[in-house]
Image (cartoon, helix red, strand yellow):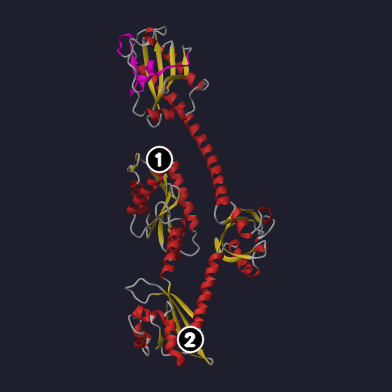
Amino acid sequence: MLIATKPDNEEARLRLLRSLGILDTAPEESFDRITRIAAKLLQVPVALVSLVDQDRQWFKSRVGVDACETSRDIAFCAHALHVDDVLVVEDATADLRFFDNPLVTGPSGIRFYAGVPLRSEDGLTLGTLCVIDTHPRKLTDSTAAALKDLARMAERELLQHSLGRDIQMVWDSEREARALSEARFAMVFQQTPTGKAIVDLQGRFTAVNPKLCEITGYQTEELLTKTFPEITHPDDLNKDLLLVADLLFGRTSTYVLEKRYLRKNGTFVWVELNVSLVRNPAGAPDHFIAVVLDITARKQSEEMLKNYQHALEQQVAERTLELTRSRETLQVITDNLPVLIAQVDRNLCYQFNNDVYRQVFGLTPASLRGRSMNSNLRPELFAELQPYFARALAGERVTCDHVRYSIEQDRIWSATYIPDVRNGEVLGFFVMSQDITERKRVERSLHDKAMLDALTGLPNRRALHDHLAAIVSNTQQFALFFIDLDGFKSVNDQHGHDAGDDLLKQVAGRLTQTMRKGDLVCRLAGDEFVVVAPDVLERDTAARIAEQLRDALSSPFELAHGSASIGASLGIVLCAGGAGRNIDTWLSQADGAMYEAKRRGRNGWRFADSSDS
């Protein structure tokens, strides 16, 4: 007996068969009607709708057979999986594949078999519609055509099962996604290292996390009985309420504020407050979400630095006043301070410089005395600082935080200009410059980290909003592409999350290589990416870019455990910048167009305002 080999697509075929949820189900009249017609039409004693499982063939409908299944090894239908049209065995005793088959030599006594493969829309063969006789016979062209027509009917019934199963899976998936989203929100809300709260429109806390309780010193139950004005420092409340009004009247969508909370023990704590307004589906205000960061340590450091700066300025002023009596003593003191110190008269000529000028400019303090600042500073730098000089000579203490004295040295200085007032008259000003290169580097590093996606290195959602805001303010037109990967979950499930992360990095690289230098490619979240192409005005151009992006992701990705293929669904919005434009609306429209592309078969693109694809 020859056992049928398994098809090359066996794994996918079995996966689809089991996903239909039809195996081992009760008889259905729609299938039984087909087998009755087949048996009557071909005048045979046996007709079956047979589905070939991993180790068995199971009969969804049967005429003339008591058993509901047989072993796959002896099944004629297992051989029919390999034919394109119909498998016909006119006399099984004369066929080398079946002459010693138990179904031929045993009580069943099969002699004649004709089976038409039942295929899915993807071309996967799930089983057969077959007829069986205990006498040898031939299959005429007309009866073969009728049997194939009946097989198509059986395929449509299987398709109905598939559609019903898909709809149920979508419903189940949506329910699971909502439950997962709610669970994730609850976990993030409770476990985040920053304070979080949900506040109603009357200002009352309706939900708080443990970190906010730690910051304020209240228990959860206590905090839920209070409003945010009750625990806000009185001096900070008015500013907070004005920003809340801006949210409610739609003038802003979020605000950030540094303020003080009054703790339960009577002390206060400095916080950075980030507040967003959530609106209901009708667009009416519903509640606020607040994120609270304890910045007390930072404020203390700033206060210490301010006090140090003030003390240093006071010390320099006092020492400078003694210049006529003890210039040498003053020079020694200032030379040993890590700060550029100078005294300048009303004509912008140096009257005094400490030795740090030698280190920075390569000039001795003595050689600078009496020289104009214009001769020591680069022309462009002098022009940049001249407004600060004028304000200092007008009696105002001013600071410039981004001074670069040398273009060869990547050093940044904070220069403060303090009026030299004597007997009510401004005689000039004092210059104090501190090297703040390291502080600026740390600030820039923190800013970069906040604007980049940690996995791919692409700009993140925050960077996207900033970029779009800049384009909108310049009334610049652009095309926005919302990209969602097709099949990414399968890669995660099959190869693991490390492979999924590797794939996302490769996707980021391909998208970046595909777009122009001035375009923005960012990762929004998960397997969602957004591309912004400035100055793309025509639909044809946007469509061509969408094709290029889709093609860039169509080639297989090489991962640690093998290759993986995915697709991409894109939503496109052509946007015109200008005041009043809503960035979130554009993103939402592009997102909706992307889901429409998925609904229409995935791995395609859609415009948000058209049915063209």
Can you tell which of label 1 and label 2 is closer to the viewer? 2
**Which amino acid type corresponds to the residue marked 2 in the rendered image?**
Arg
- Relative to 22, residue 276 above or below: below
Q: Identify the secondary structure beneath mark 1.
A: helix
Residue 146 seen from this side? no
Q: In 3D space, how far apart are the residues under numbered discs 1 and 2 (Cα atoms)? A: 71 Å
Residue in the picture at 52% in, 70% down: 302
Question: Which dot marks residue 438?
Answer: none
Residue 227 seen from this side? yes
Instruction: Tell me where the magenta segment starts and ends, as one range.
Output: 67-96
| Apparent side of residue 228 relative to residue 387 in the rendered image (left or right) | right
Residue 287 location in percent, x, y? Answer: 62, 55
Looking at the image, is mark 1 or mark 2 earlier in the sequence?
2
The answer to whether residue 549 is magenta is no
Observer-nearest residue: 557 or 569?
557
- Relative to 235, residue 324 above or below: below
Observer-nearest residue: 148 or 501?
501
> How would you rate the neighbour count of disc 2 (Cα within 10 Å): few for under 14, some for 14-19, many for 20 or more?
some
Residue at numbered disc 2: 319
Residue 22 location in percent, x, y? Answer: 49, 25
Q: Identify the secondary structure beneath mark 2.
A: helix
Residue in the picture at 40% in, 15% down: 131
| Apparent side of residue 222 relative to residue 45 in the rendered image (left or right) | right
- Relative to 100, residue 362 above or below: below
Q: How many marks?
A: 2
Residue at numbered disc 1: 491
